[in-house]
Amino acid sequence: MLDTLARTTMLTAAHLLTGVRGIAASPLPDRPCVFYGNHVSHGDFALIWAVLPPAMRARTRPVAGADYWEKGPLRRYVGRKVVRAVLIEREREKRSEDPIAQMSSVIAGGEGLIIFPEGTRNQTDEILLPFKSGLYHLGKAHRDLPLVPAWIDNLHRVLPKGELIPIPLLCTVHFGAAITVGEGEDKDAFLARARDALLAQRPAHIVEAS
Amino acid sequence: MSTTLRLFLGIFAVLGFASSVALILRRTVARGQPHAVIDNLIARINAWWVMVALVALAFVFGKGGVIVLFALLSLLALREFVTLTYTRRSDHLALALAFYLVLPMQYALIWIEWYGMYSIFIPVYGFLFLPIISALRADTTRFLGRIAAVQWALMLAVFCLSHVPALVTLQIPGFEGREILLIAFLVIVVQSSDVLQYIWGKLFGKHKVAPALSPSKTWEGLVGGVLSSTLLGASLWWITPFTPLQAAGIAFSINLMGFFGGLVMSAIKRDHGVKDWGHLIAGHGGVLDRLDSVLFSAPVFFHIVRYGFTP
């Protein structure tokens, strides 16, 4: 009850602040899939969530860093109950569980994921950081799992790094066609292809201006 | 029956007529099949019902109602404008102030009817102080373009638009208690000019006025639309403190301002490679797509009335 209320509040706030719209170049898969997006803010997954059809949203869980979401009781509550995040340990030495195994078990349980393959929030002037290999290992373990690129546009301007007050700006989430790891495709080739597929979703007027 | 009530009944009658025509077109021309022009027409008319209902609701609450309505429209318009322009992280504080301080302050100044301050607050103080705040962050990349974009956003979306509710603060001898009808006159004349230009353009449009800026603006639409909405303005003299001839002259001026406003806003959209400012109003685009002509005509109309009709 409280969890649902908190979730609705979060999604409503995302809609009111950013007027977010989802734009799908091709229809979204009608089964659980992995949305992979660019990561500029803690609110990224909320925007993807906000534009997913409710039935799909209920079966799609964001993958997030345990170091962030385990800090303090409020974050722990939001991360576990409201967002139902799949919390993974980012630092290899501290790991007690294999992140790929964690994600795989969610997929095996019939749910989808939202992941940010850059591994961390992009606070540089680069458009998109190099991808970590998790997306490849996940795709290799589930060959028929649709991996859907989701470019989140403009959210970095709503609340840039180091700022406290979010400003209302219009955001969009651009979904591309799903990809899968090809037969015999090696890690670097796949990650480059996945990254290009995500970059291809950037709206044209933004590409021209920069 | 009060003038305001008669006016709104008239508007609802016009919308009812428009909806009937659109439904007949869907039956006869589109035959129930998807049809781009007719579907867009119906979406536009439906949006008009909502917009007129919102304005009617604001009118019920009088001065406070219209100030709140236009402050919210300013917020939406400012969001659309800033979204499209180039700003950097260093502008964040200036933008936060624009949204959370300058905008509410402008409407508060109108609420307390401090004309001397609300007419210079953004053009002078916003103009001077917001660039200072951006400059303190010592990021010079495309600096002039960035501060100019913030100032333009505030001038259009807040300063110009706030002159619509400011009309209710004008004290015109013999017109006391009916000031809100000046808003009705401005909005009806300018918006009907847009609609009539669209209709004349669709029916007779051949020669484009500014093909590089806007493919839909034609000379036939411009002349037919402006003249017919000027006539409409003259026929609405009974809701204003103007004579029929004055009403026609004023309607003509604000129609021209509205047309050129649309042209300027199209140029900005073209420059940024987009067709619409946003997607809030189905069939129309964003709030700025609907308000572009009002933005340019509101301050001019305000000053005509203030200097011509108040002591």
Image: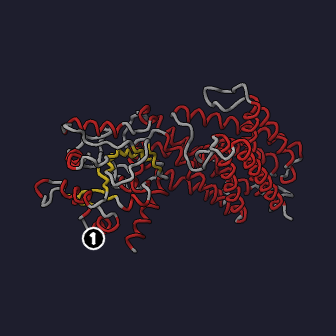
Q: In this rendering, would B128 be left or right of B106? A: left
Q: In this rendering, would B172 be left or right of A148? A: right
Chain name for mark 1: A
Identity of the residue drawn at 84% across and 56% down: B173
Identity of the residue drawn at 46% across and 45% down: A23
Does residue A80 appear in this view? yes
Amino acid type at image mark 1: Pro
Answer above or below: position of A139 versus B57.
Answer: above
Q: Position of residue A210 (x, y in %)?
A: 40, 33
The residue lying toward the viewer, choosing from B118 and A155, is A155
Q: Position of residue B165 (x, y in %)?
A: 69, 55
Q: In this rendering, would B275 be left or right of B43? A: left
Answer above or below: position of A53 versus B243.
Answer: below
User: Is the residue marked by circle 1 packed among few (<14), some (14-19), or many (20+) residues within 10 Å?
Assistant: few
Q: Position of residue B306 (x, y in %)?
A: 76, 49
Answer above or below: position of B162 versus B139.
Answer: below
Identity of the residue drawn at 77% across and 54% down: B16
Does residue B120 appear in this view? no
The residue that mark 1 highlights is A73
